[in-house]
Image: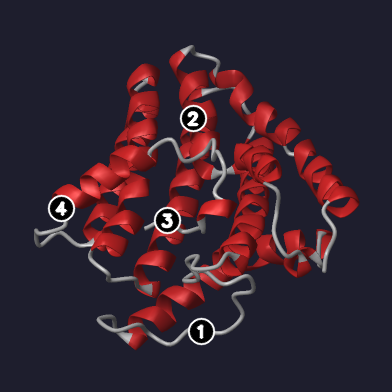
Amino acid sequence: MSKLASQDQFIDLSDYGRPFGRWLANTLKNTRFTPIDVTLLFGVSGLIAIYCILQNHYYWAGFFIILKSIIDAADGELARVKNTPSYTGRYLDSIFDIILNLLLLSAICYVSQTSFIFTIIAFICIQLQGTLYNYYYVILRNKSVGGDATSKIFEYKTPKALPGENQKSVNILFFIYTIVYGKFDQIIHSLDPNAYKVKTFPNWFMTFVSIYGLGFQLLIIAIMLAVEWIEIIVPFFIIYSLFIFILISIRRLYINTI
């Protein structure tokens, strides 16, 4: 089951792991493995990638970064095929992502000549990029007929636990989620506060926005590591953030609200 209605589906450059994710989900469908187990697995792959960076094994680091991105597509797919959606899995996935992003950039900073200040700036830029992608994508999912609405456009209120999950766990994870993502959400929402009024986004626009999806960001990092361009990873993502203003301008000028 797709997160979007057929007419709203677009070429998502960050979602290259989806075919493998569906295969893995279907393989695990009748087993005891849960979506959270898969989330933990992509976390392990990310930690191995970070270890490889610290050991200067950049090619293998790139491999495990891509593997992490591919496995990341499987937890949501498994939740769908098992019909066990959960806010616990949704928030845990996002929390793992931001922690791994910070550790990944910290490892790159440690083994390169990059300054700590520029590394933090790059981390903020990467999160803002991903937030813009998620903002538009979640709006599209919520507006799409039959689309997945587990993620909300504005995450200001603790959601009610879905069947099979514990409300206390949802409360704790939502609290952590709002702490680590809240400011990024506020910044992006303030830059394009009326985007949620759009009836739908053109497919070409969402494909363009998908260059900011986490999967595509990790693909860029993996390629740069594999070719040993480690010194330009941090400055690249700082400059890459200029597209935020281009995308928002395109949305405001050419994609009208209702």
Which amino acid type corresponds to the residue marked 3 in the rendered image?
Ser
- Nearer the viewer's eye, disc 2 or disc 3? 3
- Identify the colour scheme used: secondary structure
- Which residue position holds label 3? 2
Label 4 sits on a secondary structure element that is: helix
Number of numbered discs: 4
Q: Image point 82% across, 67% down: which residue?
A: 194
Earlier in the chain: of badge 3 and badge 4, it is: 3
- Which residue position holds label 2? 219
Image coordinates for residue 230, horizontal then vertical, percent: 54, 20
Q: Image point 35% across, 66% down: which residue?
A: 89
Which amino acid type corresponds to the residue marked 4 in the rendered image?
Leu
Q: Which mark is residue 58?
A: none
- Classify residue 245 as left or right of residue 6: right
Q: Nearer the viewer, residue 6 or 164?
A: 6
Q: Which mark is residue 28?
A: 4
Label 1 sits on a secondary structure element that is: loop
Which amino acid type corresponds to the residue marked 1 in the rendered image?
Thr
Earlier in the chain: of badge 2 and badge 4, it is: 4
Counting other residues with Cα less than 10 Å from the Cα at mark 4, is it few (<14), some (14-19), or many (20 or more)? some
- Nearer the viewer's eye, disc 1 or disc 4? 4
Q: Which mark is residue 158?
A: 1
Label 2 sits on a secondary structure element that is: helix
Spatial distance from mark 2 to mark 4, Cα to Cα? Answer: 26 Å
Earlier in the chain: of badge 2 and badge 1, it is: 1
